Image: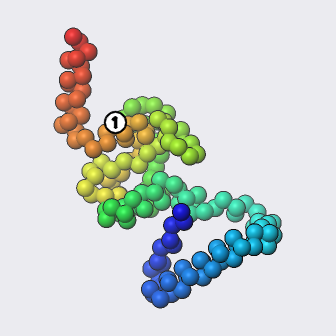
Amino acid sequence: MRQAALQRPDETAEQYQKRLRANARCRAWAKANPEKYKAIHDRWEAKNPGRRNRNRRDRYGAMWVAAKERARERGLAFNLKPADIVTPKRCPLLGIPLLSSRGKATENSPSLDRLNPRKGYVRGNVWVISHRANRLKNNATLRELEKLVRNLRKAVRK
């Protein structure tokens, strides 16, 4: 399912609706005329080498775009810039190497984490950790995680 375009800060609601209708007409035409659309697309690619996959996620980074969308959906604060998201070589919590992958996240995939979930995606409240560490941390508080480790150590010693 295609997600609707977001309203630009400099356009009115009327301009936004007009742009959505125009985009829908273009998509309908492309679907009805696949050969013509492909010819136009191929000509554009020939004139614009190297710009083929420069979509929003490539320009700004998938983590930044996904975080911005989650913040909007959940009503959280968001003031990050793409440069604010720095991916270290290793996960700061587990020490495992962080490896980017296409598609489904792996244990070693970098994952944007909020230090304080209530503050949202704001500078100073996010860091990049491994997907595994983020899943382990999930919704637990520091006190709950410490209790978990204490009880796990007791159970292993028995």
| Residue found at the far top of this picture | 158
Q: Residue at x 53, y 43 (%)?
A: 104
Question: Where residue 112 appears, x then y in whole percent?
Answer: 41, 49
| Residue 135 position within the rendered picture, expressed as x and y whole percent measured from the top left | 37, 39
Side of 48 relative to 117 (left or right): right
Q: Nearer the viewer, residue 158 or 46?
A: 158
| Residue 67 appearing in the image | yes
Quadrant of residue 28 within the rendered picture = bottom right
Determine the residue positioned at 47% across, 89% down.
Answer: 14
The colour scheme is rainbow
The residue closer to the viewer here, 84 or 151, is 151
Is residue 60 shown above or below 137?
below
Which quadrant of the figure contains the C terminus? top left
The three-letter amino acid code for the residue at tag 1 is Leu
Q: Is residue 26 left or right of residue 62?
A: right
- The residue under the point 37% across, 48% down is 113
Q: Residue at x 38, y 37 (%)?
A: 133
What crowding class fits label 1: few (fewer than 14 Cα within 10 Å), some (14-19), or many (20 or more)?
Answer: few
Q: Position of residue 84 (x, y in %)?
A: 43, 56
The spot of residue 6 in percent (x, y) is 47, 73
Q: Nearer the viewer, residue 25 or 59?
A: 25
Res. 146 image quadrant? top left
Q: Nearer the viewer, residue 116 or 5?
A: 5
Q: Secondary structure at mark 1?
A: helix
Q: Is residue 130 above or below residue 43?
A: above
Q: Is 153 rendered above or below residue 99?
A: above
Q: Is residue 122 visible?
A: no
Furthest residue in direction front, as rendered:
32
Q: Which residue is mark 1?
A: 136
